[in-house]
């Protein structure tokens, strides 16, 4: 089997750049994964590879479960994992690139910024290599270099200091194809020519044959299904999935397809109507609070009315932006008024990172909104299992909305409760 993790010493070091180039290069048969809870990078991955990208999160799931998820979707010639922040960042939660690659036995390629340095790069690498003896670092790529001579200096030093790290190549600084590209925003809509140009420029001085050699690994297979078993239910679920409500873990969708007899997808921005015979509506996170996103749904009256009608007697489960849409308003922006809670958009982040819920869940939250009044909140979200926190969930009859994003497959009992199964 072949797989590689692209990691670095921190965020904004070029992981997405190199991952993009590799996905484009191997696009005929590649599966992308994102370490951690991020929703944005998997959308880029899918736009490039034309296949769904899968999140691997060893905070929300345990090691065996992450291993099972990896192997379930590992169906292409090569897998490319994009790390989160720096290689060891997240170790305190057991969810770093180090933790995940060690659990999966997947080799890691470190992308190191070589600008303005040469011998010191090897010292940085030594720190990363010796911090944990069981790390998966097998190769490096040097980024932001001005010349082949500069690369040769760094390569010579690393090869002198290490006999177990391959120096795969280097990436020039100020690549022409990137000058007009806002990475993170433009990649999803980038045309094939631009993606090809970006990939060619990034990989021009990288030994892809050696990279493929490094990618060979022995997968750790799981013998048993490491989750609670479940039986398919003869019910129909409607998943709201569109430009506004797009923050969905791919395995959550696949799990719901396995769980429900019938699944339909509804685009709220096209004013599509939820089927009257639907038993449960799932509204994932995304954006509905900004002017641009709100304008896409403010006139979707048929959709809104079908949701309100559904809410009179049936179940709704909503996350983050979905929660906001169930509320009365976000400042002056009118929502569906299904839940009796109002929100306001703030200048500073209200939550960011992993959270524990008082209902016993682990998950991720990232938002700039907050409730104006938390009197009807039912679930505390906190940074520690028994720590102090603030209300992050609201419930009314069969309607449940929460700021917490979680993974469904390892929370079957929770899903059965809130999805009315």
Image (spheres, rainbow, N blue to C red):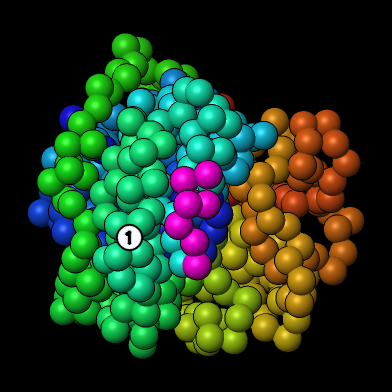
Q: Residue at x 72, y 34 (%)?
A: 359
Q: Is residue 185 left or right of residue 316?
A: left
Does the image show residue 412? no
- Asked whether 381 or 374 is in front, the reply is 381
For disc 1, the neighbor class at 10 Å (few under 14, some 14 to 19, many from 20) is many
Q: Residue at x 66, y 44 (%)?
A: 354
Return the x and y of residue 295 as percentages of the image width and height.
Answer: 53, 87
The main secondary structure of the magenta stretch is helix
| Residue 143 vertical position relative to residue 210 in the rendered view, above or below | below
| Residue 208 vertical position relative to residue 192 in the rendered view, above or below | above
| Residue 132 vertical position relative to residue 353 in the rendered view, above or below | above
- Which residue is identified by label 1? 151
Q: Is residue 269 magenta?
A: no
Q: Is residue 117 magenta?
A: yes
Provide the residue span drawn in magenta. 116-123
Does the image show residue 222? yes
Return the x and y of residue 272 as percentages of the image width and height.
Answer: 37, 73
């Amino acid at each position: 089997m072949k797989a590689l993790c692209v990691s670095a010493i921190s965020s904004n070091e070029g992981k997405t750049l190199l991952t993009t180039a590799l996905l484009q290069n191997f696009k005929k048969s590649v599966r992308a994964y994102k370490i951690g809870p991020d929703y944005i990078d998997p959308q880029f991955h899918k736009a490039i590879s034309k296949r769904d990208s899968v999140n691997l999160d060893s905070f929300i799931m345990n090691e065996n479960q992450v291993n099972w998820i990896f192997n379930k979707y590992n169906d292409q010639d090569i897998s490319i994992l994009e790390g989160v922040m720096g290689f060891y960042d997240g170790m305190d939660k057991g969810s770093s690139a180090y933790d995940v690659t060690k659990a999966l036995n997947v080799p890691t390629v470190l992308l190191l910024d070589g600008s303005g340095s040469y011998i010191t790069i090897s010292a940085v690498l030594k720190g990363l290599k010796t911090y944990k003896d069981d790390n998966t670092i097998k190769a490096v790529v040097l980024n932001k270099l001005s010349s082949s001579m500069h690369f040769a200096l760094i390569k010579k030093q690393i090869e002198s200091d290490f006999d177990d790290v391959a120096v795969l190549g280097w990436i020039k600084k100020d690549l022409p194809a990137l000058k007009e590209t806002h990475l993170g925003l433009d990649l999803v809509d980038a045309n094939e020519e631009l993606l090809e140009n970006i990939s060619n420029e990034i990989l021009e001085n990288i030994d892809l044959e050696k990279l493929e050699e490094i990618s060979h690994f022995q997968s750790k297979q799981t013998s048993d299904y490491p989750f609670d078993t479940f039986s398919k239910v003869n019910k129909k679920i409607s998943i709201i999935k569109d430009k506004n409500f797009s923050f969905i873990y791919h395995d959550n969708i696949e799990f719901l397809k396995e769980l429900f007899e019938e699944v339909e997808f509804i685009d709220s921005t096209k004013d599509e109507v939820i089927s009257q015979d639907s038993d449960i509506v799932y509204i994932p996170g995304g954006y509905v609070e900004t002017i641009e996103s709100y304008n896409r749904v403010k006139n979707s009256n048929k959709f809104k009315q079908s949701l309100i009608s559904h809410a009179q007697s049936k179940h709704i489960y909503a996350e983050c932006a979905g929660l906001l849409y169930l509320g009365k308003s976000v400042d002056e922006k009118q929502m569906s008024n299904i839940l009796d809670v109002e929100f306001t958009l703030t200048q500073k982040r209200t939550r960011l990172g992993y959270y524990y819920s008082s209902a016993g869940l682990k998950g991720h939250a990232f938002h700039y909104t907050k409730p104006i009044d938390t009197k009807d909140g039912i679930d505390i979200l906190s940074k520690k299992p028994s720590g102090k926190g603030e209300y992050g969930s609201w419930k009314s009859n069969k309607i449940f909305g929460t700021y917490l994003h979680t993974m469904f497959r390892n929370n079957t009992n929770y899903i059965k409760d809130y999805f009315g199964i």
